[in-house]
Amino acid sequence: MSFTPDHFTVWTEIPVTDLDRAITFYNTVFDAGLTKDETGPNAMAMFPTEGGAGVAGHLYPGKPAPDGSGPTVHLASPDGLEQALGRVKTAGGKVVSEPIAIPSGRFAYCLDPDGNSIGIFSK
């Protein structure tokens, strides 16, 4: 019998060199409402989910991998893919691929201001 959980991904962590700058970037691109949480041993900012359920993740002060060489976290666009890609550029990130069509929607690869690889997905 193989292991088949409801969600194989439990959560994600994106390391950033400047948490406030990263919060601004991700809020600009995703309209996520991220805020700094300093209640734990390390400051962080959680990505919200509907009703607090579902798979989420957070930003935390850390050392990102060199540009585009770490894992890629794919995040949902709040609107059309092209609109989100435009916000990536204006917020200090970089779009590194053309949109890619897959059966469930479309996505593009980007880099955040720290060089973290992110995919922006839109249905």
Image (tube, rainbow, N blue to C red):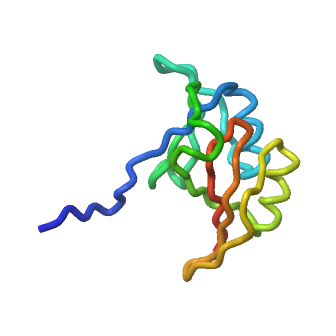
Q: Is residue 9 above or below residue 1?
A: above
Which residue occupies the foreground of this view, 59 or 113?
113
- 89 left or right, relative to 15: right
Q: Residue at x 64, y 65 (%)?
A: 121
Q: Position of residue 15 (x, y in %)?
A: 57, 33
Locate the C terminus and report the quarter of the image it occupies: bottom right
- 81 left or right, relative to 5: right
Question: In this view, which residue lies farthest toward the top?
Answer: 41
Question: In this view, which residue lies farthest toward the bottom?
Answer: 103
Q: Residue at x 75, y 30 (%)?
A: 21
Which residue occupies the foreground of this view, 36 or 19?
19
Quadrant in which residue 86 is drawn: bottom right
Locate the N terminus and report the quarter of the image it occupies: bottom left
Q: Residue at x 76, y 56 (%)?
A: 95
Q: Is residue 106 above or below residue 31?
A: below
- 66 left or right, relative to 89: left
Which residue occupies the foreground of this view, 107 or 36?
107
Q: Position of residue 63 (x, y in %)?
A: 57, 27
Q: Is residue 101 above or below residue 50?
A: below
Q: Position of residue 122 (x, y in %)?
A: 66, 69
Question: In this view, which residue lies farthest toward the left?
Answer: 1
Q: Residue at x 32, y 63 (%)?
A: 6
What is the number of callouts on the image?
0
Question: In this view, which residue lies farthest toward the right?
Answer: 90
Q: Position of residue 62 (x, y in %)?
A: 56, 26
Which residue occupies the foreground of this view, 69 or 80?
69
Quadrant in which residue 5 is drawn: bottom left
